């Protein structure tokens, strides 16, 4: 039985407090008026004129925020309003990126868990309790993301410009999409998805614990069936979720493989966290039956899914780059012009690093190596979500500063607190899983 | 130089694995084991050095990547500059996305083919070569362990019989 150590508990609470201060600081520092916004940009860029000149090259991006931005005399005024909106968005966007990122980790783990259940995998039952612990965060994490979406619908922020009736009134494309992309249906979908994910998680966990005390395999068999069913629901809901919660921040742009792309990101982040938590628990003397071969398998998944993510990232990029259609290519023009370092840095972190560090078979068994690569992978996939949300919400006024770091620290603290508290409620090793012997003797 | 070897036959891979472990425990050198299919973990049990084929695969991949880069640069940029997707930049770096699939494919192609060729050379295999396995049954349903005899024939016979061998033969072998 694992007990949530005081040191870790205090560390997670400290993270939450520091993070909360950062989040509050971000909201306090956001400008209230246009004058304040201009002053902030001037002090950052050393002259607004420069920034304005650069702006002219990337007008395409501006047209996304279709607030009737003609380039005549009204340009300056609307540009300033736009700047204010972007700076006001920044703490919200920072909060949303971090909230989504940690929710995505637990959702990725849930998908991995369901696949292990549906495949009746023999190697992984020893890790089921670790996975169940991580998916427990889906309840608070999912609810927080839902609350942020709800606040967006209530016009507390401008993350999703299609929620603004004025914008839609002047935009024929958004009018055409309004049958799907309207606030009510958006919230209904979000509620259904979260209910489905959390419902499966809680039910499967209940069956998994009941199996320990049971004298037949009925719980196990039922878990197998609902997991297979859940995967169907998950694949559809995850795809629609990625259009709704991420792709719709840029409502003119669309990509048909976006669901897969976000899936790859959450899957590899989730598997990385499973490996990291397992290594941590092992280092504290728990999970005695988990051997290097289990870590090796998780590291193989980290390696493979990192390549899978790169494949999807590149497929999406290359088709749009090649065809060069204006309404598609704006997405990458913004990112390459204003987000060059995070955009290409993320490819190095998510592809080059894991490929080179985890290619050697022996390195996949060295625990600290897996942790090191895992930290880079997690940072890289945070950047992935950052690159998906920020260009459309704060434009080129991005920075990894107090709001962003504060949000990450807060949700990291909450995540650690929640999953280790969940891990401490049940024995870490399932007793009566029919495959537990196979898992114990798992040998690569 | 011809040497005398003992051939022990097994009809089950699990029995073979146990036999290999017993023979190794008796500090005897196993010359070779012939199997109809790959037996998982046999190389470790026999104490064979880990394969270096993976390292060559990595190097061959790098060769493929280099060949692809040089080839596409010559064909598409230098020799006959091409307008790629309406972007006539005539620069390899700016047209890189169009070349990535080719770079990837040639990396895989070189790694795979050169690795197979290396494997054949290293295993001394070529077309029309006479088979080296001493008994045709090792291509069907029997496993064969070969141990060199150094005046300990009876000793070996007893040991191998105890490990569950179904047949034991002695034969002359020309070392290569």
Image: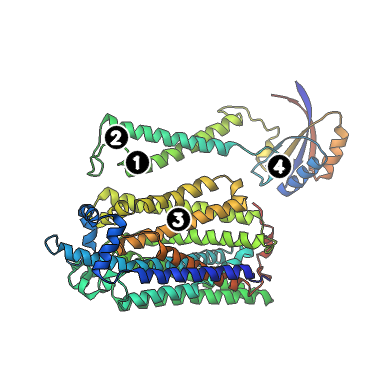
Where the N terminus of chain A falls, by quadrant?
bottom right
Marks 3,2: beta carbons within 8 A: no
Whole-number angstrom distance, CA of label 2 to CA of label 4: 56 Å
Whole-number angstrom distance, CA of label 3 to CA of label 4: 52 Å
Marks 2,1: beta carbons within 8 A: yes
**Closer to the camera: disc 3 or disc 4?**
3
In this picture, residue A295 sits left or right of residue A228: right
Depth check: give the residue in front, B106 or A12.
A12
Chain letter belonging to callout 4: B
List the residue tagged with mark 2. B76
Label 4 Cα crowd, 10 Å radius (few <14 / some 14-19 / many 20+):
many
Secondary structure under tag 2 reads: helix
Quadrant in the rendering for residue A392: bottom left
Q: Which mark is residue B99?
A: 1
List the residue tagged with mark 3. A380
The x and y percentages for residue A421 are: 59, 73
Depth check: give the residue in front, A393 or B49.
A393
Q: Residue furthest top?
A: B1
List the residue tagged with mark 4. B142
Chain letter belonging to callout 3: A
The x and y percentages for residue A190 are: 39, 75
Comes first in the chain, label 4 or label 1: 1
């Amino acid at each position: 039985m694992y007990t949530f150590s005081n040191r870790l508990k205090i560390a997670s609470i400290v993270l939450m407090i520091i993070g909360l201060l950062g989040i509050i600081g971000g909201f306090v520092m956001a400008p209230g008026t246009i004058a304040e916004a201009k002053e902030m940009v001037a002090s950052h860029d050393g002259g607004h004129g420069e920034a304005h000149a650069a702006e002219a090259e990337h007008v395409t991006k501006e047209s996304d925020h279709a607030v009737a931005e003609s380039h005549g005399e009204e340009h300056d005024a609307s540009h300033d309003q736009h700047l204010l909106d972007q700076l006001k968005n920044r703490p919200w966007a920072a909060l949303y990126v971090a909230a989504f990122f940690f929710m995505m980790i637990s959702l990725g783990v849930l998908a991995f868990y369901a696949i292990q259940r549906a495949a009746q995998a023999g190697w992984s039952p020893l890790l089921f309790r670790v996975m169940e612990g991580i998916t427990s965060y889906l309840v608070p994490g999912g609810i927080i993301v839902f609350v942020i979406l709800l606040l967006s619908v209530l016009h507390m922020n401008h993350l999703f410009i299609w929620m603004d009736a004025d914008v839609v009134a002047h935009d024929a494309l958004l009018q055409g999409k309004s049958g799907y992309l309207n606030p009510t249906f958006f919230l209904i979908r979000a509620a259904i998805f979260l209910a489905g994910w959390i419902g499966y998680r809680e039910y499967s966990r209940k069956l998994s614990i009941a199996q320990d005390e049971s004298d037949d395999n009925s719980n196990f068999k039922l878990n197998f069936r609902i997991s297979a069913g859940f995967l169907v629901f998950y694949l559809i809901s995850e795809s629609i979720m990625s259009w709704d919660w991420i792709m719709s921040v840029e409502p003119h742009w669309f990509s048909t493989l976006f669901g897969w792309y976000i899936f790859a990101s959450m899957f590899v982040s989730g598997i990385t966290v499973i490996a990291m938590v397992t290594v941590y628990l092992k280092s504290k003397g728990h999970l005695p039956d988990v051997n290097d071969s289990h870590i090796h398998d998780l590291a193989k998944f980290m390696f493979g899914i990192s390549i899978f993510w790169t494949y999807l990232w590149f497929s999406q990029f290359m088709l749009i780059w090649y065809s060069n259609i204006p309404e598609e290519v704006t997405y990458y023009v913004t990112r390459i012009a204003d987000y060059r370092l995070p955009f290409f840095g993320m490819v190095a972190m998510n592809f080059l690093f894991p490929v080179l560090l985890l290619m050697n078979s022996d390195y996949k068994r060295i625990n600290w190596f897996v942790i090191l690569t895992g930290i880079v992978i997690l940072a890289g996939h945070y950047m992935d979500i950052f690159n998906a949300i920020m260009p459309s919400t704060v434009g080129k006024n991005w920075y990894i500063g107090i709001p962003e770091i504060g949000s990450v620290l807060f949700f990291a603290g909450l995540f650690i607190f929640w999953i280790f508290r969940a891990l401490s409620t049940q024995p870490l090793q399932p007793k009566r899983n029919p495959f537990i012997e196979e898992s114990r003797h798992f040998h690569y | 130089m011809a040497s005398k070897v003992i051939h022990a036959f097994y009809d089950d891979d699990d029995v073979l694995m146990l036999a290999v472990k017993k023979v190794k425990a008796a500090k005897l050198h196993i010359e070779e084991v012939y199997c109809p299919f790959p037996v998982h973990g046999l190389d470790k049990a026999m104490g064979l050095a880990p394969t270096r084929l993976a390292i060559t695969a990595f190097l061959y991949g790098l060769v493929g990547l280099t060949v692809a880069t040089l080839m596409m640069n010559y064909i598409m940029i230098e020799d006959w500059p091409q307008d790629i997707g309406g972007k006539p930049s005539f620069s390899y770096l700016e047209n890189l996305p169009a070349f990535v699939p080719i770079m990837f494919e040639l990396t895989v192609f070189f790694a795979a083919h050169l690795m197979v060729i290396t494997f054949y050379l290293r295993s001394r295999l070529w077309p029309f070569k006479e088979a080296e396995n001493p008994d045709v049954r090792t291509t069907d349903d029997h496993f064969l362990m070969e141990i060199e005899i150094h005046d300990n024939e009876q000793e070996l016979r007893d040991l191998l019989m105890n490990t569950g061998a179904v047949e034991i033969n002695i034969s002359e072998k020309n070392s290569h």
